[in-house]
Image (cartoon, rainbow, N blue to C red):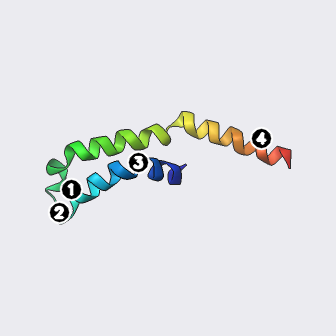
Amino acid sequence: MKAKALKECDDVLSKFTECARGRTLSVVWACREQHKEMNDCLKQFTNDEVFEEQKRQYVMETEGK
């Protein structure tokens, strides 16, 4: 689930990483927009609904063996 989220959100993650590069505390306010975009993207692939679907698929695969 995590790997898929990181792959799907790679461009957004790159934007945040670039913004955060070389910053320490200022990343909080300087990269606020990029951070929100990153979180919004990751939430699409790491929410409870997605988890339950992947769990269901895993159980079906396991029972089929």
Query: Is residue 9 found left or right of 31 in the rendered image?
Result: right
Asked if labels 3 and 1 touch by Cβ distance under 8 angstroms, the answer is no
| Marks 1 and 3, the one that precedes in the sequence | 3
Taking 36 as reference, is 49 above or below it? above
Residue 60's tag is 4
| Marks 3 and 4, the one that precedes in the sequence | 3
| Residue type highlighted by circle 3 | Cys
Foreground disc of the pair 1, 4 = 1
| Measured Cα–Cα span from mark 3 to mark 4 | 28 Å
In the picture of the structure, the residue carrying the numbered disc 2 is 24
| Residue type highlighted by circle 2 | Thr
In the picture of the structure, the residue carrying the numbered disc 1 is 19
> Foreground: 37 or 25?
37
Name the residue: 14% across, 50% down.
30
Q: Secondary structure at mark 1?
A: helix
Q: Could you tell me residue 49's position as x and y percent?
A: 55, 33
Q: Secondary structure at mark 2?
A: loop
Residue 1's tag is none
Foreground disc of the pair 3, 4 = 3
| Measured Cα–Cα span from mark 1 to mark 4 | 42 Å
In the picture of the structure, the residue carrying the numbered disc 3 is 9
Name the residue: 85% across, 45% down.
64
| Residue type highlighted by circle 4 | Met
| Measured Cα–Cα span from mark 2 to mark 1 | 11 Å
| Measured Cα–Cα span from mark 2 to mark 4 | 46 Å
Name the residue: 58% across, 40% down.
51
| Marks 1 and 4, the one that precedes in the sequence | 1
Name the residue: 35% across, 43% down.
39
Foreground disc of the pair 2, 4 = 4
Q: Could you tell me residue 56's position as x and y percent?
A: 69, 38
